[in-house]
Each structure stands twice: as C-alpha cells, then as structure tokens.
C-alpha cells in the first residue's frame, strides 16, 4: 500500500506524459514528442488517474479533453515541471561566478526559450542560469534580476531594451466554434465574442484597423496569460488574437484553427531588458548575443513559411 506521502508524489514520467497530452490534446502527439509509444503514454496517464483517484481526461475520437479537475491539475503541473527543468539546468551549469538571474514570460519561456537553452549551455558551460516567470515590468534592484525578456512596447523606464523580434498574431478559435459561426470577412468577427489578453490591450482594434474594418470596441472575457486564453478558445468561448509561433502545438493538433487567414504584425515585440547599470557582465553580453541570434533564426524561419 502506498503511504499518503508517496501517493501525493507521482512519478515525473507520469507527470510528463500527462502534461504533454494536456498541452497537445492528443495521446499520439504526446507519444511523438516524448519518443514513447502511444500505449506507454496511455498507461502512464491511467496510472496517474488511478493514483489520484480523479479522471483527468475525457477521451473521444478526436483526442483527449481535460476534465475540470484535469485543467486545474494541468496548470499546476506545467508550472512545476518548468521549475524542475530550470532547476536541473541550473544544477547542470552551476559554476562559480558568471550567474544570471533572468525573468521570462511563462509561455514564451516554456515553448520557445527552454527548448533552445541547451544550445546556450553547450556553448557557455561556465554560465549559471536561473529563471523566474514574470508578466509585467518590475524593479530590477528589488528583485535582484540581471535581465528580463519582456513582451510589449518599449516603455520600461531606466532600462535598456534590445528588440529581439516581432510577432505575428491571427484570430484563432476551436474548429467547432468556426463551424458554428462561419467567418468569411473581418466584419463577421464583430458579432462574435472576442477574447482579450491584458498584456496585449488594443490588439483587436489594431487588427480591425489593419483589415479596413470597423471595431465596435465591444468588451469580452480578458485573461492574464496565453495558456488560459488558448484554453478558453479550445473550449469554444470565442475568438482570440494569438501569437502564431506560440500556438503551433494547438494548430498542429487541430485544437485551434485560424478563424480567418488575416494575420498582422503586433505593435509590441519581444525585448531583452537590462538595467542601466553602466557595466555589463561577460555572461550577460554572451546571453544577449546568443538570444539575438536565436531570434534572427526564428524570424528567418517564419519568413520562409
């Protein structure tokens, strides 16, 4: 019989399998990402559900949909796994001196930055990296951070902002929502529920303006983070303007579709922000140069798609 403590500590293999299925909406896609068989993924998730005595997914012919309990569990597990990955990277690269504490937006960090970080580690084994999730600007001195990746406009006082890349956003929704609400022109979106992100205020107005259509300014649900607004779209609550490069997994799995193929370039961008300290460490300079190169590769890859 498992002790209460052990029951509350599922294996990392089971948690990784659950997180991948929840994020991708498909057992087969999760198996492909984790280089396991679909049966192995299914057994891991079933074992986790049995250990928790809670159903985490509703299985259907189109994939796997999180239950209410599964959605709440996913939010916590995804954050915990990201913390573990960061701690592992920190342990692997720990050296005396050359330490960088960096704040990053959660989804950008999980989906774009972390898969690339091993390349920086391989090229700079003497640099120790620590990451913290942040959405809004903060005080560098108070939080003892060396740099931040920030998405928005160039409005951070007393700091140096280096533009990494712009992002393309497009209206996205669930396939069922699009089937129930045919959209052939920008004006069609004006009668539908539009979802908003606090960090991207005004983007719907920009989109309608770029498309030469009037925007009523009608309100709708507002969310703090990409993961939450994406899940709201998947649940059929409306249409959201989402960054295409961050929504690739949901688009590939079919959980999300483009409501109308009219992307625009966002006014904001992704910046590396550093305090105006006068002196920049060798480690920070190396990270800045590497990050700019990775961002250039992303921009060039996007232009070829």
Image: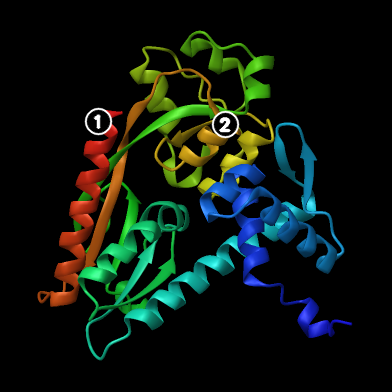
Q: Position of residue 191 (x, y in %)?
A: 60, 16
Report helix, strand or loop for mark 1.
helix
Above or below: residue 62 compared with residue 144: above
Q: From this viewpoint, which residue is outermost toward the top? A: 184
Q: From this viewpoint, which residue is outermost toward the left? A: 278
Q: Position of residue 236 (x, y in %)?
A: 68, 30
Residue 45: quadrant of the picture: bottom right
Q: Nearer the viewer, residue 33 or 53?
A: 33
Q: Mark on residue 303?
A: 1
Residue 14: quadrant of the picture: bottom right
- What residue appears at the point 16 percent right and 68 percent down from the top-left corner? 286
Q: Looking at the image, is mark 1 or mark 2 earlier in the sequence?
A: 2
Category of crowding for the residue at label 1, using alpha-carbon neighbours closer than 10 angstroms: few (below 14), some (14–19), many (at least 20): few
Residue 218: quadrant of the picture: top right
Is any part of residue 162 visible from this angle? no
Q: Position of residue 225 (x, y in %)?
A: 52, 50
Q: Mark on residue 256?
A: 2
Q: Position of residue 301 (x, y in %)?
A: 26, 37
Report helix, strand or loop for mark 2.
loop
On-image quarter of the C terminus:
top left
Q: Nearer the viewer, residue 245 or 37?
A: 37
- What residue appears at the point 58 percent right and 43 percent down from the top-left corner? 29
Above or below: residue 169 compared with residue 158: above
**In-image side of 70 versus 122 (left or right):** right
Q: CA distance from mark 1 to mark 2?
A: 22 Å
Above or below: residue 182 compared with residue 194: above
Chosen colour scheme: rainbow
């Amino acid at each position: 019989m498992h002790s209460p403590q052990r029951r509350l500590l599922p294996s990392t293999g089971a948690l990784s399998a659950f997180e991948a299925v929840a994020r991708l909406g498909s057992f087969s896609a999760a198996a492909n990402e984790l280089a396991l068989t679909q049966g192995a993924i299914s057994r891991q998730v079933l074992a986790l559900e049995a250990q928790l005595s809670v159903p985490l997914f509703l299985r259907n012919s189109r994939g796997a949909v999180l239950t209410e309990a599964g959605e709440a569990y996913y939010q916590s597990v995804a954050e915990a796994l990201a913390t573990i990955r960061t701690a592992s990277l920190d342990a692997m690269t720990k050296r005396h001196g050359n330490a960088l504490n960096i704040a990053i937006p959660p989804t950008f960090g999980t989906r774009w930055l972390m898969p690339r970080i091993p390349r920086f580690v391989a090229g700079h084994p003497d640099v120790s990296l620590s990451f913290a999730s942040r959405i809004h600007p903060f005080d560098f001195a108070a939080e003892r951070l060396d740099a931040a990746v920030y998405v928005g406009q160039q409005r951070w006082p007393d700091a140096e902002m280096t533009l990494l890349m712009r992002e393309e956003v497009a209206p996205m929704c669930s396939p069922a929502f699009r089937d129930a609400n045919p959209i052939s022109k920008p004006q069609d979106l004006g009668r539908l529920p539009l979802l908003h992100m606090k960090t991207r205020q005004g983007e719907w107005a920009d989109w309608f303006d770029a498309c030469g259509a009037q925007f009523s300014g009608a309100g709708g649900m507002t969310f703090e983070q990409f993961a939450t607004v994406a899940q709201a779209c998947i649940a059929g609550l409306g249409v959201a303007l989402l960054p295409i490069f961050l929504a690739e997994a949901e688009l590939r799995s079919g959980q999300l579709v483009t409501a109308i193929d009219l992307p625009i370039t966002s006014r904001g961008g992704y910046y590396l922000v550093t305090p105006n300290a006068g002196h920049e460490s060798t480690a920070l300079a190396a990270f800045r140069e590497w990050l700019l190169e990775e961002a250039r590769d992303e921009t060039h890859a996007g232009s070829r798609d």
